[in-house]
Amino acid sequence: MISPRIVVVGAGNVAWHLARRAHAQGLSVEQVFSRDPVKASNLATAIAAQPISVFDDLDVQADYYVLAVSDAAIGSVAAKMGERLPPSACVVHTSGATPLSVLQPHFERCGVLYPLQTFSKNREVDFSKVPICLETAQKEDYPGLEHLARRLSDQVYAVDSEKRQTLHLAAVFVNNFVNHLYSIGAALLNENDLPFALLQPLIQETAAKIQDHAPATMQTGPAVRGDQVTMERHRALLNTHPDLQQLYQFFSTAIQKHHH
Ligand SMILES: NC(=O)c1ccc[n+]([C@@H]2O[C@H](COP(=O)([O-])OP(=O)(O)OC[C@H]3O[C@@H](n4cnc5c(N)ncnc54)[C@H](OP(=O)(O)O)[C@@H]3O)[C@@H](O)[C@H]2O)c1
C-alpha cells in the first residue's frame, strides 16, 4: 500500500511526538500547522515537512489531517479547515475526552486516533508501545486509519467515543491524580529536608507490582489494615495542612470501603 500523506495540525506535545514518529516510520508528513510560525517551523524542520501558519496554505490533497490541538479548539479548528478542504478529506483528532461528534458537522470522513500516553516535548517515549485507540465515522475508513496507526504503534484498538471517554477518565485517575500525589509526597519530604529520591524505589515497585497482579490485591498500608493508631498519628501530622488531612481521610475511607 502507498504511504498515506499526512498533515499535522498543532505543534504541541502530541503533534511533536506523533509527527516525529510518523516520519521515523517512513510515513510522509507533508505539512505542520501552528498559529505560531516558529513552532510550526521547529517541528516541520525536524521531519522535512512544510511549516504553515494559515489555513489557506493547507495542502488540500493529503490523505489524513491529524488535529493535535487543545480539546477546546478542535471544533473551531475543524470548522475553519472545513471551509478549505474538499469533502473527501479525512480528518481525525487525538483527544481521549472529546467525542467524534465534534468533527461530524464539518467532515463526513472523520475519526479519532487517541494515543493513550502522557506526552511532553522534552521527554522521549517508546511510541511502538503506546496504545492507539481508533474510531471512524464511516466503517469504510477504519482499515485505512488502522493501517496508519499500525505503522506508529504495535498496540492498536478500536474504541468508540463513549468507551474512550471512560478510558480517558480512568487515565486521569491513574496518571494525573497519582502524579499529583507524588507532588504531595515530594512537598512533605521537602518540608522535612528529606530527598524525594527516598521514595523513588517505592514508586517504581508500586507500578511494577501491578504488571502481573490486580491493583486491588496489591493494596497495602494502614487503611486496608484498619490500623487506627497509625492513621490517627498521620492525621495529627497533617494538622497544619487541613486540605491534605481531608484528602488523607477521603482516601483512607475509600480504600476501606473498597476492601470490605
Ligand atoms: N499531552 C498528552 O499527554 C496527550 C495525550 C493524549 C492525547 N492528548 C490530546 O492531544 C491533543 C493535543 O494535546 P497537547 O498535549 O499536544 O496540547 P498542547 O501541547 O497544549 O498543544 C496544543 C496545540 O493546540 C494548538 N491550538 C490551541 N488552540 C488553538 C486554536 N484555537 N487554533 C489553532 N490551534 C490551536 C496550539 O497551537 P499553537 O501551536 O498555535 O500555539 C498547540 O499547537 C488534545 O486533544 C489532547 O487531549 C494529549
Image (spheres, rainbow, N blue to C red):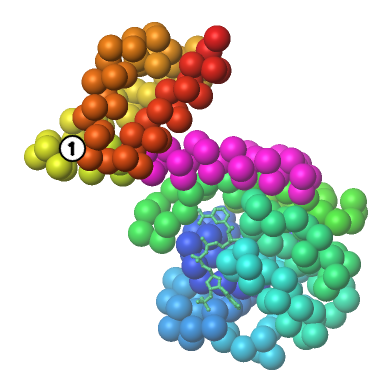
At a point 54% along the width and 65% down the height, the residue shown is 15
Q: Main secondary structure of the magenta part?
A: helix
Asked whether residue 219 appears in the rendered view, the answer is yes
| Callout 1 secondary element | helix
| Residue 127 screen position, x and y as percent | 51, 47
Residue that carries the numbered disc 1 in the rendered image:
189
User: Which amino acid, mark 1?
Assistant: Leu
Vertical arrangement, residue 251 with respect to residue 122, above or below = above
For the view shown, which residue lies furthest in the left direction? 193
Categorize mark 1 by other alpha carbons within 10 Å: few (<14), some (14-19), many (20+): some
Residue 142: within the magenta?
no
Vertical arrangement, residue 232 with respect to residue 59, above or below = above
Towards the viewer: 67 or 26:
67
Position of the N terminus, as image quadrant, is bottom right
| Residue 11 screen position, x and y as percent | 51, 71
Vertical arrangement, residue 195 with respect to residue 140, above or below = above
User: Is residue 109 toward the left or the right of residue 254 in the image?
Assistant: right
Towards the viewer: 242 or 5:
242
Ligand 1, by image quadrant, is bottom right
| Residue 223 screen position, x and y as percent | 40, 16
At a point 64% along the width and 56% down the height, the residue shown is 95
Towards the viewer: 128 or 24:
128
At a point 53% along the width and 12% down the height, the residue shown is 259
At a point 44% along the width and 48% down the height, the residue shown is 125
Q: Quadrant of residue 130?
A: top right
Position of the C terminus, as image quadrant, is top right
Q: Quadrant of residue 162?
A: top right
Q: Quadrant of residue 77?
A: bottom right
For the record, the magenta segment spans 154-182
| Residue 9 screen position, x and y as percent | 61, 73
Towards the viewer: 239 or 131:
239
Vertical arrangement, residue 235 with respect to residue 103, above or below = above
